[in-house]
Image (cartoon, rainbow, N blue to C red):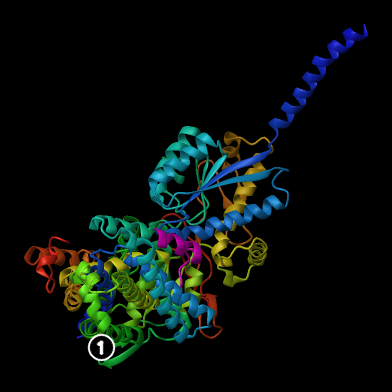
Amino acid sequence: MLRKVTIAAVPLAALCLSALIAGNVSAQTAYKVGISGAATGPVSPSYLPHIEGIRLYLNQLNDGGGINGAKVEAIFLDDKAAPSEAASNAKRLMDDEQVLTVGLMSLSSTYAPMFQAASRTKTPILLLGQAVCPGDAAGPQMNPYVFCVGSTSDPNTAGAWQVPLVKALAEKHHDPLKLALVAADIPISRQGIDNMEKIAKQLGIEVVDKQALPLRAADVGGAASRIIASGATYVTSWAPVTTAVQMLGALRRQGWEGWYIHNHSAEAEDTLRQLKDPKLVMSPEYAFAADKLPVFSKIEAAAKKYNVNVSVDQLSLGWASGMILEAALKKCGSTCTREKLVEALNGLSEKTDGIYPDAVAWTKSDHRRPASFTAYAWDPKTQSVKRITEWSRVKDGELAKVTVLE
Amino acid sequence: MSLLVIILIQASFYALLGMGYVLIYRATRVLNLAHGDLMVFGAFIFYQALVTSNGSLIIAILAAFVGAMLLGAIVYTGIMRRLAGYPVAVGILATIALGILLRTIATLLWSGQTRYPAEYLGQIGRPIQLYEGVAISGIDAAIVIVAVVALLGIPMLVQRAAVGVEMRGVAENALLAAQRGINIHTINSLSWAAATVMATIAGVFFSLKVRLGTDIWFVGLAGFAPALIGGMDSLRGVAIGAIIVAAAEVLAARFIAPQIALAAPFLVLLIALWIRPWGIWGSHEELERI
């Protein structure tokens, strides 16, 4: 009898044990995510600091216990800003590693292979750091798997802020306004200044020169002399910061003393600090460390702890990206799947401690981050970077209202 | 008039770069496609010394000079010397690999971050008014002066100094030079070291004028067209080549469109090669080797 009971108890115990194990497996052991970005290659200075920022955020998150008791296992891959590398990263992350989501921090030329793989595998893609938000993040042709945390500063939105900013600065300083537009010789940048030209005309601003500079020019002295000859008092560009710095330097060396208004990049604040030119203005969509928000102290402390040798202002967008990722995974719950994550992202609303001025909020029909801008310049009196305008929200098809600070 | 000044500045910069190509080509018949990366590496040595010494320009220049000499000598001794006797194409391919290697090492050592070494040196970019409408900045004036000194001094050194005569001997006939007791590897090392110094000077000027980053290696390629137009084995020819290229670039940017400024020198190069393939001052016999 005893033997019969024992024989019956063994399979029963095994069944209970396997049920227990199965129960544990269904709960999240780790949130596996992928980050694909331009860590090396010619454009890496604009993306690598953000990649380091999110890595730093996830390190401190995991060391603090993770999310819902599970760690975030992040797989970082370099795409060198090359579409072919992005395609191979997409396959590895979405097919082989079966990640819950892919954070993309790279040039828009890498989007197509990533988006195709995302649609095929139903994997949500988060455009992080400075990755530009594509047109299909909202509207009738919307891609349901693409969510924008990064730059909303597409060529049209940027112009709606930057050109009114030029006008406001000229009015504030009682300068005659003759505007020159500078782009890098790449399609999206040229599109940016084409749009600015239209807005300038709409605002009654005289555009005296418009030019696109080769990204690999050794010297732009000739192009700068053309701007000076045109009589421009203000120059504005929508281009990589390297283009702006090269043009500004060439203009200054030839004695030009006007204002130069540029969009922004990972290195924007650092550039202001190093160049110390009081008439160089950067206009970002996020707060610079100069604003001394408490979150910057947190980032600084974490960078010190994890021995990350990148300045706070360059880590902040990656840090904010980490905050969004954490909020999304938390909302997705302890049995998170790709489907559940898409659902969670569709209703997400998360503040980033002021790094972005507005909460990052998505709905089922709009995956863009609200676009708000401000402007910073070097203040020779305080020998520091200083915000020179209020924040201004730019809505679809409207021009920004710019308030220049005293 | 101001356009002439701009052309002069740009030509001076290209001449500094071009001389590096010529020095190596004359000695080893190798077209050094790692010149831009040697330029970046040398400029980073300058920057590192500048930062470490709290902005001492003298220490930074000395460190860059010594570092560049060593780097050039190591490149020749460690890589190029072993390829002696192989077809010229092997040497050229080796310089491509060398360039990628140097770029990777520079990224690992100094990261991809952009630097502005000029911040340590104050107002070197401020224009100095020559007369009405014509200005030149301190850094541009330095580029012109150094280029003129190099264009006059290096050919003179090659013509008159003992080491220069040995360099010419090795360049003309290495076998005969070796039989006459000249240590050709020492001479070739010196040529590589001198070329790396020239690349470093150009890199330092570019980083002080524009920026410093591992991505600026492409600037080094700008010296290739002047060297080819002037004649790959002619130090004098570089000056003429540099003026032609700079004029083409500046005038195209000013009067046509900046987009074609990069293409203009190569259009000039094509025309020059069509008329005189061995370059303005190059030796006729170099044609097949190129």
| Rendering coords of residue A332 (x, y %) | 64, 40
Q: Is residue A279 left or right of residue A300?
A: left
Q: Magenta segment range?
A: B101-115
Specify the subunit that label 1 lies on: B
Indicate the quadrant where residue A73 lies.
top right
Residue A76 in view (yes/no): yes
Q: Residue furthest right?
A: A2
Q: Amino acid at mark 1?
A: Val
Indicate the quadrant where residue B32 lies.
bottom left
Please state which of residues B157 and B263 is positioned toward the viewer in this rendering. B157
Q: Is residue B106 located in the magenta-colored stretch of the structure?
A: yes
In terms of secondary structure, what is the magenta stretch mainly?
helix
Q: Is residue B266 located in the magenta-colored stretch of the structure?
A: no
Q: Identify the residue under disc 1.
A: B134
| Rendering coords of residue A79 (x, y %) | 44, 49
| Quarter of the image with the N terminus of chain A in it | top right
Please state which of residues A49 and A151 is positioned toward the viewer in this rendering. A49
Residue shown at the point (56%, 39%) measured from the top left: A99
Q: Residue furthest left?
A: B275
Q: Is residue B143 above or below residue A168?
A: below
Q: Is residue A226 above or below residue A40?
A: below
| Rendering coords of residue B27 (x, y %) | 25, 70
Residue A176 in view (yes/no): no
Residue shown at the point (46%, 33%) measured from the top left: A120
